[in-house]
Image (cartoon, rainbow, N blue to C red):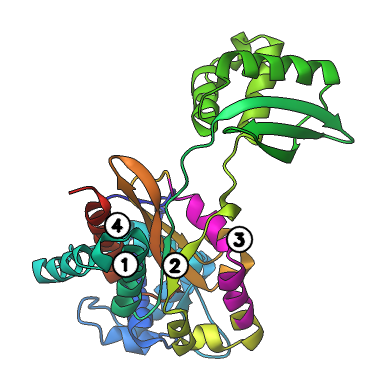
Amino acid sequence: MASKTGHSGDPGLGDRAQQVLKALVEHYISQGEPVGSRTLSRNRSLDLSSATIRNVMADLEDLGYVQSPHTSAGRIPTVRGYRFFVDALLTVRSLESEELEALRHSLATSGAGRTEDVLAVASGLLSAITRMAGVVTLPRPGEDSLRHVEFLPLSGKRVLAILVVNEANVENRIIHTERAYSASELEQAAHYLNQNFAGKGMDGVRRQLIREMGVAREHMDRIMRTAVDMAEKAFTPTPQHGDYVLAGQNNLMEFNELTGSVGRLRQLFEAFTQKREILHLLDQCAHADGVQIFIGEESGYQVLDECSVVTAPYSVDGRVLGVLGVIGPTRMAYERVIPLVDATAKLLSAALNPR
């Protein structure tokens, strides 16, 4: 199972420090209370004195892996600590065959094959098993086909992209560029794109231009370089038109770290309702290979600073249709959630594929 996180461990963290960090994170995930050196000294896997553990914990705090939440003598993991734990210290075990068979049966027999019902069952299963929020994005619509494009310069480093997609749908997008472009440059870039890519899928055009031309930008003429810059920004998919099935969001009210601030909890539930930020985050995972993990502030959205999101894409006939995942506190049982999300994505793909 792949776990694509985009991060790597700190090679400067010694073995003893890694052992203490692992024990601390595991204890905090299990108990939800700040962990002190005396508590860890009772951990048989460490075989270290309380004084030694106290010194190591102080070093870990200086390095940013743990923090003291208040006047308590105990520590809790930081986002950096969780990230190192997930990337370097976590042992992920596959689900038991009985669990896999139960998941497979539930998905295969749900809704008499109706896609919406199968997705709702998948979301509910993720929530029921983890006691957190389960989410599944609805299948992505077929790729938009480019019919015609025009670019008009606006004030500042902004460009209005007028896109005619599919048969006659017109979309206006304002894109921000790294430099100002003249009307002539934009006209020539649009002409190049219309002449070479009309009738092709927009996302495919974007990827092809970046792949084939981006590696040799210094050899490209001005028109082609402008076309690449415009296509890279203007043809980016817009996930806010999508939707998702969410289950078990009320489970999050059981976690003290999320309910400590009523205002923060309200913002989180508003984000679930408005969907735009959650969808944008999930859409980033649509082309990922395997499991993606966002811990706390890594999501880029302040409303999710106290949460972790574990996702994986699901597909039919090799084409990614959407993403499923679990949203919960950063203090989640990653060794349990990661294989569950991975397995459910594969089983959902199997359930949706034509028999």
Q: Circle 3 sits in a helix, a strand or a loop, which is it?
A: helix
Is residue 222 placed above or below 159 in the rendered structure? above
Residue under circle 4?
A: 345
Residue 247 part of the magenta segment: no
Residue 46 is left or right of residue 38, and the answer is left
| Magenta-drawn segment | 266-286
Q: Amino acid at mark 2?
A: Val
Q: Amino acid at mark 4?
A: Ala
Q: Amino acid at mark 1?
A: Ala
Q: Amino acid at mark 3?
A: Arg
Q: Are marks 2 and 1 in contact (CB under 8 Å)?
A: yes
Residue ID at (78%, 34%) = 160
Residue under circle 3?
A: 276
Q: What separation in Å lies between label 3 and label 2 (alpha carbons)?
A: 13 Å
Q: Circle 4 sits in a helix, a strand or a loop, which is it?
A: helix
Disc 3 or 1, which lies upstream in sequence? 1
Residue under circle 2?
A: 245
Residue ID at (22%, 47%) = 354
Can the viewer see residue 70?
Answer: yes
Disc 3 or 2, which lies upstream in sequence? 2
Residue 122, numbered label: 1
